[in-house]
Amino acid sequence: MPKCLSNSASGFIRRHNNITKRKKTIIKNKKNMKRLLTILAAVVMSNALVWADKRAEGDALYEKFAHWGFESKADSILAGRDAALTFFADNHQWEHYYYVANLAIQVHMLHEDNPSACLRECQQLYKFATDHRHAYGLASVQAQMGWIYGYLGDHQEAVRLLKESIENIRRQRIENRDVLGIYYIYAYMLELVGNYDEQQRIIDEGKRIGEKLNISETSPEAAQLLSDELLNVEALMLVHRGQPEKARPLIEKIAGRLRDGKEKSVYEAWRAIAEYHLACGEYTKALEATQQMELQLANVNNSGLQWGLNLLRTEILRHLGRSDEAYDTLRQMMELRSTQTVSQLRRQLSEMDSQYQIDEMRIREQKSHFWYAVIISLIVIIALAVFTFFRIRTARVLSRKNQELADALGHAQESDRMKTAFVQHISHEIRTPLNIITGFAQVISNREYDITEEDRNRMLSDISHNTNEITNFVNELLELSESESQSHYSKTDDVDIAALCRSVIAECESENSAKLQLLLESSLPDGFTLKSNAAAIQKILSRLMNNALKFTEHGSVTMKLGIQNEGVKIEIEDTGIGIPPEHQQKIFERFYKVDTFKQGIGLGLTVARRTAELLDGTLSLDSTYTTGARFVLTLPQ
């Protein structure tokens, strides 16, 4: 076979095999998908069946409790309540849950006659319904509380709660057969407060809901009970409105149902008949009806119904003229009320005692928890205090270190500034007199210059003067260095201050050349001496006098002496240019000059103040003196 045909055949076979494999894979995936869908369908169906079974079981349990309610089987209801509530809660059948819970409270109320305990149960159930935001639960509990308040005789509060319950039912559009029971209770309470128009509307609305739900087919027993209750309430309403003739057909229907044994709400039926005969003046028939009512209460411990029955019977007996029996009935009513009051007080005391014991246990437990909390809080507070203490101490140490570093940095910067200022001042102040000395020396020494003797003498004088200036600069630097290195001057001299001042003034006369008046004013006693350092004081006074001569062109320089605090005060004032206020705080700083063009390096006042401090004295500028400048030196004894 040619090679090209062989390759084509092998390629065809490979493609065929690949297609076959893909088909098998697709078929296998389809089978797996079908199997998976079958499993999912089975799971869904199983869950649906389980849910349906639980729903059916819940409905059956609900019907059982409803039947027990119609038959007034209180023991069965109370015995099965907890298990039923657990089942309904686990399967989220909340309408059945609230029906059974309210039914148990109602049975508890009717058979134990303990309204306060029933109200507490209602409040707990209401909180539960509020937490779950269940509309029917809230409406049903409100209706139950309204029924209890009506039982206690607070009909206004009962009507308010029942009205809120009906409004919730309307707002949430709740429609089930249990709602009809709420309509019946509301209609009954409206009859007690005499609001017959609203009662008629509620009765009609309840009938419409019953027809819409068609409960006569789904639950004929419940339908018959609700129908009988609404019929009884409607008949009573017509009687109380003074329309017994309109109530007659309803009363006949009720009586027929009683004869046939079909009436479900027997007590209310006989009550309607008794009220009707009383309104029609048929008192004997009314009294017979109350006897039937009493038979219905034989096995029921309901003081509210018993009180209503006795009140109705008393009214009938009064109309029959049987006053003695009416009185006995009233007396029985009062005895019953007293007995009930004592019983209720005993029950309340028992409940208070039980609650007290529970509260005492809670208080002990809370005290235990309180002391645990106190101990833990103290430990936390101590830990926080220790932490805060060390943190504050660390912060203070860091702050101190930072301040020391800042101070050191400031000192370093100040030293650098001072060094720069020192170099600038020295270079300027020394260069100028050196240039003068050098220039004049070259002129004098050069024989080619023809200068007069007068000019030569003036030049020599300038050379001498500038040489002295340079010497003074060096002396000031040396004195500043010396004062900085010392902590104090020795004070072993008995200094005659007046004589020392005259000596300083005499030295300054040569430089003054009679240009200014140099005066001395002293109030010191004759022979006054001061234990101090004469050389140091002389340096201070010489610098202050030289400073005054330098900045005073006309007038005088006066030195005043006086006693101050057992020491001496020396004032040196001049009539010169003075010191501007903006410079007065800085004149004692190193190298500071008010007039930068004046000769000097700005250390005279600095050295003078430092020397005064080493003598335990002070040197300051009197800012109140405005004629010139006044410096005040104080020295202690």
Image: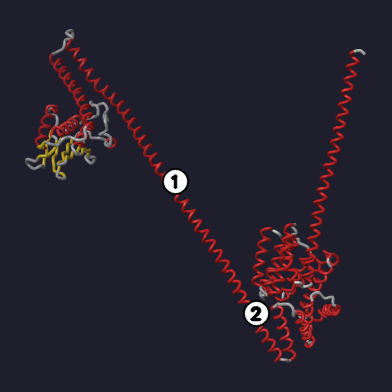
Quadrant of the image containing the C terminus: top left
In the displayed image of the protein, which residue is found farthest to the top?
448
Eyeballing the image, is 253 above or below 622?
A: below
In the displayed image of the protein, which residue is found farthest to the right?
1
Eyeballing the image, is 273 above or below 14?
A: below
Scheme of colours in the image:
secondary structure
State the image quarter where residue 410 is shown: top left
Q: Are marks 1 and 2 in contact (CB under 8 Å)?
A: no
State the image quarter where residue 462 is shown: top left
x and y, in percent, of residue 236 in the image:
77, 78
x and y, in percent, of residue 447 in the image:
16, 8
Q: Secondary structure at mark 1?
A: helix
- Circle 1: residue type: Phe
x and y, in percent, of residue 294 in the image:
75, 82
Tell me the crowding category of disc 2: few under 14, some 14 to 19, or many 20 or more residues within 10 angstroms, Cα based. some
- Circle 2: residue type: Gln
573 or 528, which lies in front? 528
Q: Which residue is mark 1?
A: 387
- What residue is at 66 percent from the left and 75 percent from the top? 152
Instruction: Decide if residue 78 is on the left or right side of residue 501.
Output: right
Eyeballing the image, is 427 above or below 286?
A: above
Please indicate, yes or no, whether residue 162 appears anywhere in the rendered image.
Answer: no
| Marking on residue 340 | 2
In this rendering, the count of numbered labels is 2
16 or 535, which lies in front? 16
Tell me the crowding category of disc 1: few under 14, some 14 to 19, or many 20 or more residues within 10 angstroms, Cα based. few
Eyeballing the image, is 364 above or below 300?
A: above
- What residue is at 24 percent from the left and 29 percent from the top? 602
